[in-house]
C-alpha cells in the first residue's frame, strides 16, 4: 500500500490551534501539514455564529485548494458553530473538530459525573460542549465557564504570571470549591493548554485536566486509519508544515512559537487574503 | 445662525471608543452622534497597518453615507495608521484622531519631559505617539509600552480586579521606579480609561494620567467651532446616538455599557456588514 501523501489541513482563528498541530505532529510523524491561522479576523470567540461560519467556509476553500486529504478545525469556536456545515458542504474529505474529542475525553475521565468546561464566550454561548457531553453521558452535570481573558494572557506569553493566577482564581476558585465540585476540567479553547500550570495551581491536583489538542490528535489518527488515508512510513516531507496567515506573519511567528513549543520563522509564514478567494 | 444639524461620526474597532463618545457627549450636549464599532473584526491592535487602513476606509464610507459633518477616529490603532490616508481620501469633512490630542495633553502635563505611553501592540509598533510628542517637544524622552492584556481585562469588566492590578504591576512597575521615571502617562488606547484605578495603584499619585478621550473631545469642540459646524443650542435630537456594529449587537450593548458608563439597549444597536458597502 503506497499511502496517501496529501497533507492534512489544520484551520484556526489564529495561533491557538498550533497546540493541536503540535499534538498532531507528535502523534502522526509521517504526515505533513498545512496550517491556516485567520489572524486578520481573530478572535472568533467573541463573534456571532453567522460571521464565524462565513470565515470558516473561506478558510476551508483555501485548504481544499492546497489539496488536503483531511480537515481539522483546530478552533473550538469554529468547531462549535461550523462543523456540521462544513461536513455537509465539503463532503469530499473528512472534517474533524475539537469539541467531540474533548467531550469524549471528559466523559472518560470523570468519576463523579460533574464536568466543567472552560472556553471562549462564543463556545460557551453555543453550548456545543454541554450537548456533546450529555449525548455521551445523559446524567452528566456540565458547568460551562467563559474565560475570555485567558486568551489574551496566553497570547502575551504569560503562561504562569501573577496576573494569570489571579485570573484563574477569579474564574475557577468558586467553581472548584465544595463537595459538589467537578472532578474534571475540559480545556475548551486551544489557547488554554499553555496555561495549565496556573490553572492547576487554582484547581488542585485532584481534578482531571482534559486537553482537547491531545484528544483531537487521537481522533484524527483514528479517522486516517479508518479511511485508509495515512501517509506511508518515511514519506518525503514527513513532519513538514506549510504556514498561512491572513495578517502579520511576524506576529504569527512570535506568538505562535508559544503555542507550538518550537520556533517559527517569520519568513516561513505565507500571507494570504481569504476574502479574495 | 441656524447651526449645522448633521451628526458627528465616531468610529472605533469595537466598544473602547465609547469612552471617547462619552467625553464628546458631555462636552457637546447639543450635538447628535453616529457611532460605528467594527466588532466583527476587532481588535485592530494586533493587526497590520494595511489591514487596518482597509477597514478604516470601509467604516468611513458607512459614516459618510450617514451624512456626518465630522469624523472622529476614536481608535488609537486606526488613528495611528489611517488618519493621514482618511484626511487625504475624504476631504469633504474634517477628520480627527485621538493621537494628536493625547500627545498634546501629555506634553502639557509633563514637568520632567519624560512621558510614558501605554497602548496596543499595533499603536506602539507604529510609533505614532512618540513621533507626535517629539514634534511638539523635541527633547522629550518617550517610553512606549504595549499593554495588550489590558484590552481583554477592560472588555471583561475587570476594571480593578486582582488580575488587573497584577497585569498593571507587570507592565508598569519597573517603568515607574527610580529617579528617571516618567512623570506623565498617556493612556494611548480607548479601553484603558476604565482601568484608571488599577493603573493608579501601581504608578502612584504623583504621575499625571492623560486620558485621550477627554483631550480628543476638546479637540473636536475646537474644530467644530473653527469650521462653523456646531449644532444650534437645543437642536432636536441633541445628545442622541445611533449605534452601528458589524457583529453581535448583544455583546456590543453588554460590553459597551462598561465603556459608555450608561446602559445600551441591544435593540438599539444596528447590525451592518461593511464588506458589502
Image: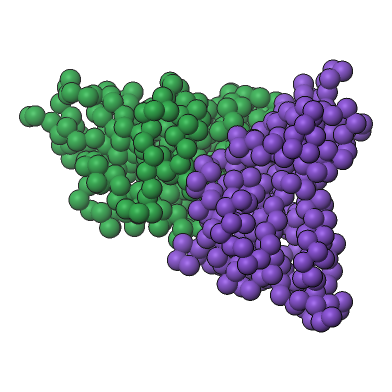
Chain colours: A green, B purple
Q: Is B125 displayed left or right of B230 in the figure?
A: left
The residue positioned 41% from the left and 56% from the top of the image is A53
B126 lies above or below B271: above
A132 lies above or below B11: above
| Along the line of sight, the residue nearer the viewer: B95 or A51 | B95
The residue positioned 71% from the left and 46% from the top of the image is B99
Tell me the quarter of the picture where residue A90 sits. bottom left
Tell me the quarter of the picture where residue A215 sits. top left
Q: Is B48 displayed left or right of B67 in the figure?
A: left
The image shows residue A191 at horizontal and vertical percentages of 51, 35
Tell me the quarter of the picture where residue A23 sits. top left
B259 lies above or below A161: below
Q: Is A216 displayed left or right of B164 in the figure?
A: left
Q: Total marks drawn?
A: 0
A223 lies above or below B139: below
The residue positioned 43% from the left and 21% from the top of the image is A262
The residue positioned 82% from the left and 39% from the top of the image is B106
| Along the line of sight, the residue nearer the viewer: A199 or A159 | A159
Quadrant containing the N terminus of chain A is: top left
Residue A180 seen in the current view: no
| Along the line of sight, the residue nearer the viewer: A210 or A110 | A210
The image shows residue A181 at horizontal and vertical percentages of 62, 38
The image shows residue B227 at horizontal and vertical percentages of 77, 66
Amino acid at each position: 500500500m503506497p499511502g496517501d501523501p496529501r497533507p492534512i489541513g489544520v484551520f484556526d482563528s489564529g495561533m491557538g490551534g498550533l497546540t493541536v498541530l503540535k499534538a498532531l505532529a507528535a502523534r502522526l510523524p509521517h504526515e505533513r501539514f498545512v496550517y491556516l491561522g485567520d489572524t486578520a479576523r481573530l478572535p472568533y470567540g467573541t463573534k456571532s455564529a453567522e460571521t464565524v461560519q462565513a470565515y470558516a467556509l473561506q478558510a476551508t476553500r483555501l485548504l481544499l485548494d492546497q489539496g488536503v486529504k483531511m480537515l481539522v478545525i483546530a478552533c473550538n469556536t469554529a468547531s462549535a458553530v461550523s462543523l456540521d456545515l462544513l461536513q455537509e458542504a465539503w463532503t469530499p474529505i473528512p472534517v474533524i473538530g475539537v469539541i467531540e474529542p474533548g467531550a469524549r475525553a471528559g466523559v472518560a475521565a470523570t468519576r463523579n459525573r460533574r464536568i466543567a468546561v472552560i472556553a471562549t464566550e462564543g463556545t460557551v454561548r453555543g453550548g456545543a460542549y454541554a450537548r456533546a457531553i450529555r449525548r455521551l453521558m445523559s446524567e452528566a452535570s456540565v458547568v460551562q465557564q467563559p474565560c475570555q481573558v485567558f486568551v489574551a494572557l496566553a497570547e502575551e506569553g504569560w503562561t504562569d504570571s501573577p496576573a494569570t493566577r489571579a485570573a484563574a482564581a477569579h474564574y475557577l476558585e468558586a467553581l472548584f470549591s465544595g463537595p459538589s465540585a467537578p472532578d474534571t476540567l475540559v480545556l475548551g479553547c486551544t489557547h488554554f493548554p499553555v496555561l495549565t500550570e496556573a490553572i492547576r495551581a487554582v484547581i488542585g491536583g485532584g481534578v482531571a485536566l482534559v486537553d482537547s489538542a491531545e484528544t483531537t490528535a487521537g481522533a484524527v489518527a483514528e479517522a486516517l486509519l479508518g479511511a485508509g488515508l495515512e501517509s506511508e512510513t518515511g514519506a518525503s516531507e514527513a513532519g513538514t508544515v506549510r504556514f498561512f496567515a491572513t495578517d502579520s506573519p511576524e506576529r504569527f511567528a512570535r506568538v505562535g512559537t508559544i503555542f507550538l513549543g518550537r520556533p517559527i520563522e517569520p519568513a516561513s509564514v505565507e500571507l494570504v487574503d481569504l476574502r479574495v478567494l
